[in-house]
Each structure stands twice: as structure tokens, then as C-alpha cells.
Amino acid sequence: MALADTLNRRTLGSLHEDPAAPRKHIDIALIVVTGLLSLIGLALIYSARHRHLLDSGLDPFYYVKRQGFALFVGGIAFVIIASIDYRKYREWALYLFGASTAFLLVVVSPLGSRSNGSQAWFQVGSFQLQPSEIAKITLIVALAAFAAAGNGHLDRRRLGVALLIALVPAGLIMLQPDLGSALVLAAITMGTLLVAGARPRHIVVLTLLGLISVAAILQTDTLKQYQRDRLTAFVDQGTQPAYQQTQSKIAFGAGGVTGQGYLKGTQTNLSYVPEQHTDFIFTVAGEELGFVGVSIIMFLYAVLAWRIWRIGTLSRDLFGMLVCAGALSLLVFQLFENIGMTTGIMPITGIPLPLLSYGGSSTLAFLAMIGLVESVHMHRFI
């Protein structure tokens, strides 16, 4: 009798379980594809640096361990952020945006660390924290919260305020200077405002203004000469080839259809491609895994983009939809720009490939963003 009563209670409990419970609406596909891309990233990072580290008498898993730690911390952030009702972030938008802006201000002060011509990091022990990566996520939340308050109507005044919100972090990032991250913020802004109700002609005008602004920046001393050369080299590769893109295209050409084999890439093992484990990680896949391996990676990214799009369309409110629009804009732009610069059709801007490129700040921020998208899906019925 006691056993029967226990079973009956469990049965009745399951029948009365709230169907809107967040745990019943976890998007498993989103988590799986994110995990697969992260594992592929670890494998590519190892291949990109293991030979150089071995030749130097160092641990060949040095970068893999550091990236693995970033993934672990990012995974914790994912769980925490996804478990909180995404509407809370709308309430916290001003504070989150203010905190990230404060970090951007401090990083260009003497407290920031300079590397590769930019002052964009905080040195925390042996790790570096890049506030511009966090600013991408807080801008998504801030713009979504502001635009959602207009209930899908953006007149010129509200459009102007939204642009000012985006210009604050973008301007501070250009002081570093980091044109690549500023362009990501521009893509987030365009995607969010378009879904929020901005008219197509406004988007066209803003795009033209953005292109004019980039051209103007290239004519000033905001960027170093070598940074301007990297940005403009792709336009006239015949007379002004960029070394990185030249070696990158050689690596892709050597990969062919099936690739040279994992850990067997010539360009990779000889360290001919600069920054290969970070900005140019895609060349490792192109050379060692070939067209087949690259296609699999692109398919996984397509699934990731589809899940974000789907979650946005299923959202029960405008804020959730706009959060997904901003996340999708970030993903698509960084994919297009990173893969474009490694294949020679886009300028070299230093934008990482999400989940594949080595980098603790970018990995942590991207997983936090995916957690935010997951929260929209999990809590939409509450």
C-alpha cells in the first residue's frame, strides 16, 4: 500500500506539473551545436599551435587548456544567465550598460594594457579581459530594452536616441582603437533597429553614413599606418597584398576537397599564417579538413543561426525578439567578416570566429549571449 501511494503521488505530481516550467522548454539543439563548435574550436587551436609549442619545449596543450578554462567559465555563465527570466535583464539594462561603459572608460586609462597597437585589455594575472566583448552583449540588451519600450514604433526621435546609445560604446572602443569591434556594434544596432520597426530608408541612410565614417577614419590618425594597410589591402591585392591573407589563401588552396589531414597542414605546422589560433583559425580547418570539413563547420553555424532565429520568432514579447535579433546580427556579421578576411574578400579587422577562435573574453561573452537567447526560449511562457 505504501508503495502504491508513493507511485500515485508521483503520477498526480507529474500531471499537475506546470507545463510552462522553464526546464521543460530548454532548446537542446542550441546547446548541442554550441558544444560541438566549442569542441571543434579546441581541436583547431591545438593543431594551430602544438608544433610551435613543441619546438619551443613548451606544453603543446597550453592554449587548449586556457581555452578550455574559458569554456568552463563561459558554461557556468550560460547556465546562470539562462536560468534567470530574460525579462529581468530588461529591468537591469541601464545598470548593465552603465557598467560596461565604465569598463570601456577605464581600459583606455593607464589601468588598461596595450597589445598589438591597441589598449583594449585588462591584465588579470596571466589572463586578459577585453571589455569590448562584454559591451557587445550589454548593447544587445540595452537596445532591445529601449526599442521594446516603443512597441515596434521608431520615429526619428527614438531612432536618434537608439543611435546615441550605440555610439557611446562604439566611440570609446575607437579610442583603443578597435575598428573591428566597433563594426560589430554597428551590425548589432542595424539588425536590432530593423526588427524594432526602423524604416528601410533609415537603414540605407545609416549604412551610407557608416561607410562614410569608416572612410573618414582611414584618412585620420585614429588608426596606426599598419592598421590602415590591413584594412585596405584586400581592395588591391594585386599590387598591395596582405601577408596574412596571402598565406591564408595558400592554406585554403592546399586543403582541396578533403584536406591534408588533421595535424598535417604544411602552412599550419610551419606557422606561416600569423595569429592562426585567433583571428585566422578558419585556415586550419581549410587546410587540414578541406572543403568537406569547412562545410560541416558552416552547417553547424547555420543550425546555430536557425535556432536563434526560431527562438526569436517564438518569443512572446518584443524584447525577447529583439534580443535574438541582436544576437543573430552579431553571429552573422562576425562569421561573414572573419571568413571573408581569411579568404581575401573582406578587410582584416581582427574579429574572432565565434567559439572557434582562441580568446577568453570573446568565448565568455559569446556563451553568455547564447545563455541569454536560451533564457528567452525557456521563460517565454511565464
Image (cartoon, rainbow, N blue to C red):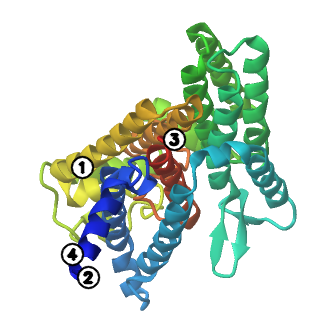
Q: Is residue 240 visible?
A: no
Residue at the disc numbered 2: 2
**The N terminus, quarter of image:** bottom left
The disc placed on residue 4 is 4
Q: Amino acid at mark 4?
A: Ala
Q: Is residue 156 left or right of residue 328?
A: right
Secondary structure type for disc 2 = helix
Q: Earlier in the sequence, mark 1 or mark 3?
A: 1
Q: Amino acid at mark 1?
A: Val
Identified at 35% across, 78% down, the residue is 50
- Determine which quarter of the picture holds residue 341: top left
Identified at 36% across, 69% down, the residue is 42
The outermost residue toward the left is 258
Q: Earlier in the sequence, mark 1 or mark 2?
A: 2
In the depicted view, which residue is nearer to us: 266 or 351?
A: 351
Q: CA distance from mark 1 to mark 3?
A: 23 Å
Residue at the disc numbered 1: 294
